[in-house]
Amino acid sequence: MNLPTFLRKSDELTQQLSKDQLLAVIHEIARTLPEHKRESFLDTLTAASQTTATDSPKTTCDDHQQLLIELKHNQDVLAEINNGIRCLDSEYNEEWDDWYNSDADEVLFSDSMGVLSEIEDAIKLIHKCIDLAVYKEGCELAETLSVLEITAKGDYEDFCGEPLGINDLYEHELLSGSMKKTVRECLYLEYQGNRLEDRAEELLCMIHNFQCYSVRLEDVLQTGNFELPEFEQFLPLWIEYLGTHSGMGVKILLKEAQSMLQDEQQILDTARKYANTCPELYKQILEQNSDPDKNQRMMSIGIEALERISENTKVRSEIALLTAKYAYENNQESVCEYCWLEAFRSNPSFVHYLRLRFCGDNWENNKRQAAKICQGLYKTDNELYFMLLFWNKEFVTVMTQGMSVRESLGWSFTFMKEGITSFLLLLYQGTDLPAGLSCLLNYVQQKYGFTAEEFYKGTGHTCAKNSTELLWEIICKWKQEVKISNEDRIRWMNKINQLISLRVDGIMTANRRKYYHECAAFISAYGEVKESHGIIGEKNTFMAEYRKRYPRRSAFIQELVKFGYVK
């Protein structure tokens, strides 16, 4: 729950409480408060007894004048720093090593001119300006800090050629305290020191200047002694300004701002307006709904989002699955399947394909669209392309084109390993997987990021099985659709035998020990498939052939033993 919503709800509730009820609530909060927060809680109560929410900070004219003098002096010093009159010194750390001692500082800085202490003083003055409500001059100091450039003479200047910013000083641990706290306080002064119509531009500009993209508007709201004035009027202006910009952190700020709106229609209008630049706003609406009575409306909003957002946007896939969840709650099975298809269209993946194919009843209606989507993967994701062709039963194409690498090495980013694995799992006759095939199934599951949780997204169902068990269950269901002639089975097994031999020989010749386990898994799985077709003892026989071929590779033989080889 964001801060404006929390404050609104807490205000509504406290207005309904009597004095005795409020006292009881405060007592309960105090009773359960951690020890490290008790002093600040008492300070808050003490301050509340001495002032009201509309009081201004208790300052004297002398306090104000003294602060202005300090600000003027500090601005003059910062100007000297910015102009390079006062600078840091730097030298390369001879003990630093990117490999052996990467935790050490690469560059050592020294400060003979008091640069860092002056910047620390400026940060303290920022805090003082907030306490004394000196917003105009505090805003000017905050802007100066945001664009301050600090020269570091010596090796750093020679190597980098760029001055340091405040963010760099924090990164090199040259300043104490928190970068985020400093930026938050500077943004607070920037808000207070500008007119309503200028605030959005100045705030975003300052965030970019500081390069601190972790700060949020809610952080600024919780800064200072009083709430930000004109915030309700500012929020639409902030959203409007963010909507015209892109870049680091802007989308996150826009999503946060939208979540602070109270009017549902205004929230939806914002999502519609920025559907192309920030489609995440639609997703946020669907995620944040907790009212079951609004399921129908959420489904309609989700369908609208799918129509408005570009098809090649990955977040559209997430929106499709959220919409499918609401469609399931409304018993709209056809809408569910439409959403699964759109999820696959916007983010073609193995799990999206399997959901579309096996969770619904209209695969025949969706098959042509899915095939068209698959064709677009040939140039962008070759491995996924051939995997989906395999599941479409285009085995000849997969074998001749997807598994055509003739070299024994360099199989990464090809379909060779996945192809061997897929054919062996297809050709295996049985329900319980032995060690080798189980290892290969795990490989495919991890390679393509298949999880039970992801598979059931947008279906309204859950699964007690683990991801590997579920994948094998789906494979077994699919295998019932596949008819393989004896000639094809023999031809494919011969081809796989040749590929395994090629791979193992290449690995041994190149002494790639880290691939011994993979080779042993292929050998074991091949023998397990043979045994499943009635050739008793073939697994151990096949393993023994490779042991004889490489008798001095003890590490390789140990891997064979792990998969059940008996010497």
Image (spheres, rainbow, N blue to C red):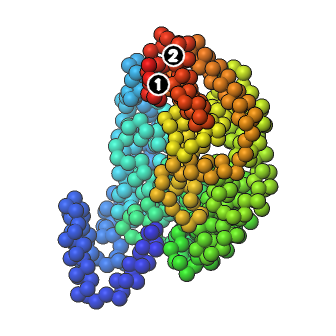
Badge 2 marks a residue whose secondary structure is helix
Residue at image position (36%, 86%) is 15
Residue 565 is marked as: 1
Where does the image place residue 36, in percent across and percent down from the top left? 22, 59
Q: Is residue 43 above or below residue 176?
A: below
Which amino acid lies under the numbered mark 1 shown in the image of this protein?
A: Tyr
Q: Is residue 156 above or below residue 295?
A: above
- 27 lies left or right of 387: left
* Residue at mark 2: 547
Of the pair 533 and 130, the residue shown nearer to us: 533
Residue at image position (34%, 83%) is 14
Query: Dividing the picture into quarters, in which one does residue 357 lie?
Result: bottom right
Q: Is residue 323 above or below residue 54?
A: above
Residue at image position (59%, 30%) is 535
- 423 lies left or right of 455: right
Can residue 547 be seen? yes
Query: Dividing the picture into quarters, in which one does residue 25 lie?
Result: bottom left
Of the pair 492 and 359, the residue shown nearer to us: 492
Label 2 crowding class (10 Å Cα cut-off): few <14, some 14-19, many 20+?
some
Task: Look at the image and tell me in which quarter the N terminus lies.
Answer: bottom left
Which amino acid lies under the numbered mark 2 shown in the image of this protein?
A: Arg
Q: Earlier in the sequence, mark 2 or mark 1?
A: 2
Question: CB atoms at circles 2 and 1 under 8 Å apart?
Answer: yes
Badge 1 marks a residue whose secondary structure is loop
